[in-house]
């Protein structure tokens, strides 16, 4: 059945959901955003069927509403919803990275016609805005649902079915456990990534070659520091209690580490590193994590003109699509390593075979 679906906040995430629903379903999509340029873009590119600049007027006319504005703005939209009178049933969900504050206000909506099920697709990008939206953004990602206490099982199934074309995998959590877990694996690492970049910036005053040396490891660990500061500021303050607890733990741990260094306790430092390596290596590599990691293939190449193009050309001929490509190490005349990332295991293995047939040395990490 064709549904009227309102997407409020047509940025990276709202735009990606809209693109996906437009590509795979017949639902009638309505976009609401405070940014007029975004609405014009969405209409021009036919990402939605209609746009609206009046949230309260439009939300009472739809079957489904997906709130995809920044977390604090989503909370404001729910406050507005709370004051409205709905004549027909509506299923409301959101995409916010933090859930406790969202679910607190959602639980307080006292209207039989309204069902609220929180949502958080655990995939994204450091880019923002509708121009960066992609229909396949959530493929293979974990999509967390946090239903309100009164949400019926049928409504949860309906939402999963509605979002099934994203090819995400759904799991249900309560808001508090969601906020603790996402803080450990996403919010807190973001804070640390930014602080590592700040540290490099400070030390650059003494050593001006630091940016030239900042290669592989530093770039890997700080990639997320390139994300939108206003989004992360919002996330940090919405989840500040959990973040503060993690910071306390971290500061204590750093003090302990410093003490091990000060006292020359090499054995303990070794065990600390060994334990971390074992835990990291034990994280299930074949199963996609919350934030999708991709299937990497390492290819030896020589620093010759066109070497990278040749590899990409071979894959393109076979219509194998690449998610990401990175040169890990290349100096004049010396073998370099190309890391090519694929969305699927099949593409990774097919490329492995193809490049070997063409005389390349390739490696897949197990
Ligand atoms: N960027 C990411 O990687 C991920 C973000 N999220 C969550 O998704 C939500 C949206 O984030 P993005 O799409 O990345 O941000 P974005 O900045 O790309 O898009 C946000 C959109 O909301 C609009 N907006 C701002 N205030 C509004 C309001 N009061 N009413 C309606 N629209 C409003 C903006 O104009 C913009 O188009 C956030 O809650 C974020 O926590 C969830 C998963 C991943
Ligand atoms: O890709 C990454 O590393 C991200 O950090 C993406 C991301 C950002 C915010 C979320 O709430 C979930 C996922």
Image (cartoon, rainbow, N blue to C red):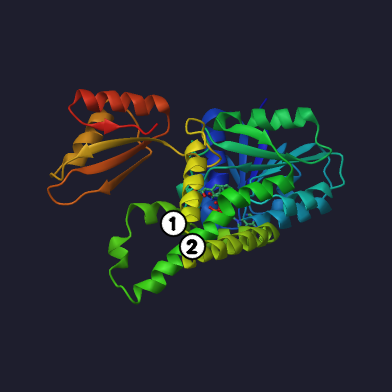
Q: Position of residue 66 (x, y in %)?
A: 66, 43
Residue sitting nearer the eye, 52 or 105: 105
Please indicate, yes or no, whether residue 10 appears anywhere in the rendered image: no
| Circles 1 and 2 in contact, beta carbons < 8 Å | yes
**Disc 1 to disc 2, how far (Cα)?**
7 Å
Task: Say what secondary structure mark 2 lies in.
Answer: helix
Horizontally, residue 164 falls left or right of residue 83, namely left
Q: Position of residue 30 (x, y in %)?
A: 62, 42
The dot on residue 329 is none
Rendered view: 185 above or below 354: below
**Which residue is most to the bottom?**
205
Mark before the other along the chain sequence, 1 or 2: 2
Q: Which image quadrant is residue 17 in? A: top right
The dot on residue 194 is 2
Residue at x 51% of width, y 51% of height = 40
Q: Position of residue 33 (x, y in %)?
A: 60, 53
Q: Position of residue 250 (x, y in %)?
A: 59, 60
Callout 2 environment at 10 Å: few (<14), some (14 to 19), or many (20+)? Answer: some
Residue sitting nearer the eye, 111 or 335: 335
């Amino acid at each position: 059945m064709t549904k009227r679906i309102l997407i409020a906040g047509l940025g990276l995430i709202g735009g990606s959901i809209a693109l996906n629903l437009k590509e795979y379903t017949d639902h009638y999509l309505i976009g609401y955003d405070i940014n007029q340029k975004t609405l014009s873009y969405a209409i021009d590119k036919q990402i939605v069927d209609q746009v609206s600049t009046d949230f309260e007027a439009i939300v009472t006319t739809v079957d489904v509403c997906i709130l995809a504005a920044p977390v604090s703005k989503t909370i404001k939209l729910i406050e507005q919803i709370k004051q409205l009178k709905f004549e027909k049933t509506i299923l409301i969900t959101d995409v916010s990275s933090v859930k406790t504050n969202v679910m607190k206000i959602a639980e307080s909506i006292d209207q039989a016609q309204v069902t609220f099920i929180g949502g958080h697709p655990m995939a994204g990008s450091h880019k923002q805005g509708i121009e960066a939206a992609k229909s396949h953004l959530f493929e293979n990602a974990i999509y967390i649902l946090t239903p309100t206490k009164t949400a019926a099982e049928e409504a949860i199934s309906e939402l999963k079915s509605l979002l099934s074309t994203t090819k995400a995998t759904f799991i249900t959590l309560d808001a508090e456990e969601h906020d603790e877990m996402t803080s450990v694996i996403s919010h807190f690492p973001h804070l640390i990534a930014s602080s590592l970049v700040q540290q490099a910036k400070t030390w650059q005053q003494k050593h001006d070659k630091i940016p030239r040396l900042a290669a592989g490891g530093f770039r890997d660990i700080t990639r997320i520091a390139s994300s939108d500061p206003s989004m992360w500021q919002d996330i940090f303050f919405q989840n500040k209690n959990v973040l503060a607890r993690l910071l306390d733990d971290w500061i204590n741990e750093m003090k302990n580490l410093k003490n091990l260094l000060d006292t020359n306790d090499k054995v303990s430092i070794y065990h600390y590193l060994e334990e971390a390596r074992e835990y990291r290596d034990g994280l299930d590599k074949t199963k996609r994590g919350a934030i999708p990691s991709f299937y990497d293939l390492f290819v030896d190449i020589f620093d010759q003109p066109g070497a990278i193009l040749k590899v990409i050309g071979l894959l393109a001929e076979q219509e194998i699509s690449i998610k990401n490509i990175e040169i890990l190490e290349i100096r004049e005349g010396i073998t370099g390593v190309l890391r090519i990332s694929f969305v699927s295991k099949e593409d990774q293995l097919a490329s492995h075979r193809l490049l070997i047939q063409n005389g390349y040395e390739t490696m897949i990490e197990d």
